[in-house]
Amino acid sequence: MNEPTTKKSLPDTYLGIISRVIDADGVYPHQAVCMDKDGSLQIYALAIDVPTWCRLFWEKVQEFEEVIFGLDMTTRPDQGTRYADALVFVHWTRNVARKLGDPECFRVGVINYQDDPRIVDDIDWTNDHWNHWLRAVLGESRPPFLVRVEKG
């Protein structure tokens, strides 16, 4: 008898990847995961600066159904994180963009972590500081054109 399988969400898959790649230097190169229409994943290790990271994010939104791009950040106590390090990421899904009729709709997540002892928290979707920061950075780099989505 076949047991039913539960498909992991892309954010859960990303959390699993990040949990495995943390080392004493954090999470570098930056990690990105993109899913195409048939559910195949492409995983990227991006040794690039933030402006190039932003440009590449907007390019991948054009190509894929679901996209997550993360940046490893050193944090301060007033930024709503638990440890000195956090992985801040953007999650974009074509289906959500289509339903809302908004190609720029994405959500920002934060993975609080430390290397020694190894602690990796669940995704925090409510961090105001990093949400505002990443939305501003991506907004400044947004190309004059975006993927076409029709509300449906």
Image: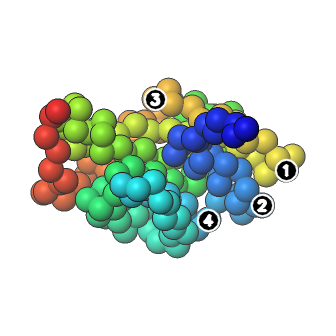
Which residue corresponds to mark 4? Answer: 28
Q: Quadrant of the C terminus?
A: top left
Give the structural element (helix, strand or loop) at label 1. loop
Three-letter amino acid code of the residue under disc 3: Asp
Reply above or below: 38 against 97: below
Q: Quadrant of the N terminus?
A: top right
Cα–Cα span, label 4 and label 1: 17 Å
- What x and y, as percent, mark residue 5? 64, 39
- What x and y, as percent, mark residue 77? 63, 34
Three-letter amino acid code of the residue under disc 4: Tyr
Which residue corresponds to mark 2? Answer: 24
Q: Closer to the N terminus: mark 4 or mark 1?
A: 4
Which residue lies most toward the bottom here? Answer: 47
Q: Nearer the viewer, mark 4 or mark 3?
A: 4
Q: Closer to the N terminus: mark 4 or mark 3?
A: 4
Q: Closer to the N terminus: mark 2 or mark 3?
A: 2
Residue at the spot 22% in from the left edge and 44% down from the top edge: 103
Three-letter amino acid code of the residue under disc 2: Ala
Cα–Cα span, label 4 and label 2: 10 Å
Residue at the spot 49% in from the left edge and 64% down from the top edge: 42
- What x and y, as percent, mark residue 129? 47, 34
Which residue corresponds to mark 3? Answer: 128
Cα–Cα span, label 4 and label 3: 24 Å
Say the numbered circle drawn on residue 140: none
Q: Closer to the N terminus: mark 2 or mark 1?
A: 2
Cα–Cα span, label 1 and label 3: 26 Å
Asked whether 125 or 99 is in front, the reply is 99
Three-letter amino acid code of the residue under disc 1: Asp
- What x and y, as percent, mark residue 118? 82, 47
Asked whether 11 or 41 is in front, the reply is 41
Cα–Cα span, label 2 and label 1: 8 Å
